[in-house]
Amino acid sequence: MTSRLLMPVRTAVRTVGGGAGPVPPREAAGSTRPTPILDLEHPRVAAFAAGVLREADERGAATERARLQVAHGIIASTVRPVYSVEDRRRVSRTLRLGRGSCSQRMAVLEAVARTLDVPTRVRGLLVDGAFWYPRFPRLRPFVPEEVLLAWPEFLLDGAWVPVAELFGVSGERTDESADGFTNSGPETLFEAVARTSVDWDAPAACAGSAAPCDLSAHLHTDLGRFDSRDELFTRHGQTLCRPARTLAEPVLGRWSAGAAPLTSEPPTSESPTSESPTSESPTSESPTSEPPTSEPPTSATPSAA
């Protein structure tokens, strides 16, 4: 059983002809502009992107795709994976903390892309909360019924490329693992895209298959494309309602989502702070540290779940 009580109230997804079928997913032109979340002009973000570019040049990564692959690897090795629930966290803060959720680390990748003048947009996906059961086996009643996922896309060579295809298209990747992503163990969704295909659209579920992972069975609703994750979260809220985030973030924001240790310092003039669970009080994660937001009304507080 998953919980609706922890989620914001969302307007029902419209249908064509009053129920004859789903509305075609909305499109978006994308952008390279900064946003409150993708705060490209912050010195920490600019320094990080400059460091990525230097590292890419040293590795001979000449194309935009190759540079983003380098950026992905640097983020994976320097920003510790945690279960943070603040999807609207600024990229500069994620880099300062040196830890972030899959959503927050994908935002860092988007910020680097926009700094390199690569337009980005996101696809809004409402994913079945049961997809996260393997990570929270004893907390299933508290797992939201649906998780709102901002899935990045990058405009490369005139075509939109989902983050899952940044390292190649399924069936054409020479380095692809035969084991699909299962959302259990130390590997997170962010790391998985570099190892195996992750597909939200294929017709069958990947459970029990040795083929590259097909996650379409976990997708509840495709909300379409948005020019930025800011626009997505403004229109549809975050996964958890504000009271739930306020109570959960001090714990989940430090709860490690992966076992891999950091392998190097991020390529910035100021490395992120390495913090222990006791080095920062829970109250330091105040709502004022995140971009201002107007969200749908909440359905209930976590204590009512």
Image (cartoon, rainbow, N blue to C red):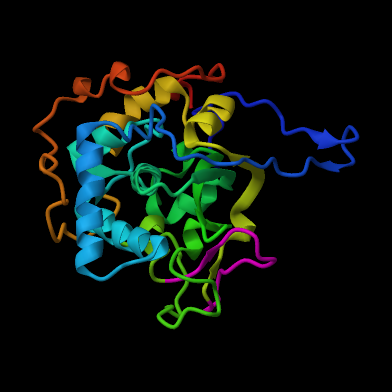
Residue placed at 45% from the left, 64% from the top?
182
Q: Main secondary structure of the magenta part?
A: loop
Picture coordinates of residue 102, whole percent (x, y): 37, 48
Q: Is residue 198 magenta?
A: yes
Picture coordinates of residue 80, whole percent (x, y): 23, 50
Give the image quarter of residue 195. Answer: bottom left
Q: Is residue 183 magenta?
A: no
Q: Is residue 255 visible?
A: no
Give, as a single range, the part of the protein colored magenta: 196-211
Give the image quarter of residue 193. Answer: bottom left
- 116, above or below 252, in the image: below
How many numbered marks does the figure carry?
Answer: 0
Q: Who is closer to the viewer here, 13 or 64?
A: 64
Q: Is 117 on the left or on the right of 197, as rendered?
A: left
- 184, above or below 290, in the image: below
Q: Residue furthest bottom?
A: 174
> Where does the N terminus fall, quadrant-wise?
top right
Q: Who is closer to the viewer here, 112 or 242?
A: 112
Residue placed at 48% from the left, 46% from the top?
119
Picture coordinates of residue 183, whole percent (x, y): 43, 59
Q: Is residue 64 visible?
A: yes
Picture coordinates of residue 235, whole percent (x, y): 58, 26
Q: Who is closer to the viewer here, 94 or 281?
A: 94
Residue placed at 51% from the left, 38% from the top?
144
- 135, above or below 8, in the image: below
Give the image quarter of residue 260. Answer: bottom left
Residue placed at 41% from the left, 34% from the top?
87
Q: Who is closer to the viewer here, 85 or 235?
A: 235
- 162, above or below 111, in the image: below
